[in-house]
């Protein structure tokens, strides 16, 4: 009878079967200059990682700094490598893993919001039901006719996903989503 083979103790031998993927929200503070976004995103594509959400905006005009908020899904050890590599890119000032700070209590989780504009076409009972459900989800009507509504909804990505799922059988036509904007909680900067 043979003994079971023990896996090596080194982290270099971790296989996907031994580690579960995680969704992570990263906030990257960079100089607002041409080519920085391409360099940051190139690290993800070079490793074969998809970016589920990406938002970029100048946040400190006087210092010419921008915040890139990235939501990605992957193996924790590879995301740690990506964070380390991002820190070494010259125009990057800080890399903050907002998800890591959010482990544990609800009060420690980051504030995440997304805006979506959703068009729903329908008549009769479906139209009435779409309007009723939009009210429950606190979605605003920003355009309407006798055949359609365009709703604006703001909230956590999971809330928007649920709203989209509910609107699907009621005549969902199209969706436009901004991507996640996120900050850590508390009085201090990231």
Image: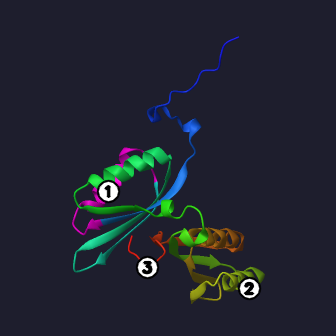
Direction from residue 148 to residue 101 in the image, left or right: left
Q: Please state the total of marks drawn on the protein image.
A: 3
Crowd class of label 2 (few under 14; some 14 to 19; many from 20; radius 10 Å) = few
Crowd class of label 1 (few under 14; some 14 to 19; many from 20; radius 10 Å) = some
The earlier-in-sequence mark between 1 and 3 is 1
- The x and y percentages for residue 85 are 32, 50
Q: In the depicted view, which residue is nearer to us: 30 or 150? A: 30
Q: Residue at x 32, y 56 (%)?
A: 40
Residue 9 visible in rendering? yes
Q: Secondary structure at mark 1?
A: helix
The earlier-in-sequence mark between 3 and 2 is 2
Looking at the rendered image, the disc whose residue lies closer to the viewer, 3 or 2, is 3
> Is residue 165 depicted above or below 77 in this figure?
below
Which of the 4 quarters of the picture holds residue 171? bottom right
Label 2 sits on residue: 128
Q: Is residue 147 magenta?
A: no
Q: CA distance from mark 1 to mark 2?
A: 45 Å
Q: In the depicted view, which residue is nearer to us: 3 or 72? A: 3
- The x and y percentages for residue 151 are 58, 82
Q: Secondary structure at mark 3?
A: loop
Q: Secondary structure at mark 2?
A: helix
Label 1 sits on residue: 40
What are the residue bounds of the magenta stretch?
Answer: 30-50
């Amino acid at each position: 009878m043979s003994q079971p083979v023990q896996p090596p103790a080194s982290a270099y031998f971790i296989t996907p079967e031994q580690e579960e993927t995680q969704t992570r929200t990263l906030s990257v503070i960079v100089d607002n200059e041409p080519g920085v976004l391409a360099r940051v995103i190139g690290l993800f594509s070079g490793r074969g990682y998809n970016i589920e959400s990406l938002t970029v905006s100048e946040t400190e005009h006087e210092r010419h700094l921008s915040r890139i908020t990235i939501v990605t899904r992957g193996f924790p050890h590879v995301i740690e490598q990506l964070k380390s590599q991002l820190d070494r890119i010259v125009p990057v000032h800080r890399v903050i893993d907002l998800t890591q700070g959010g482990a544990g209590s609800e009060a420690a989780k980051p504030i995440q919001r997304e805006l979506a504009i959703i068009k729903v076409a329908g008549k009769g009972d479906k139209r009435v039901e779409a309007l009723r459900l939009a009210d429950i989800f606190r979605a605003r009507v920003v355009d309407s006719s006798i055949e359609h509504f365009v709703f604006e909804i703001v909230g956590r990505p999971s809330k928007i996903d649920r709203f989209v799922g509910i609107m699907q059988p009621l005549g969902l036509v199209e969706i436009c989503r901004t991507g996640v904007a996120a900050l850590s909680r508390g009085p201090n900067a990231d």
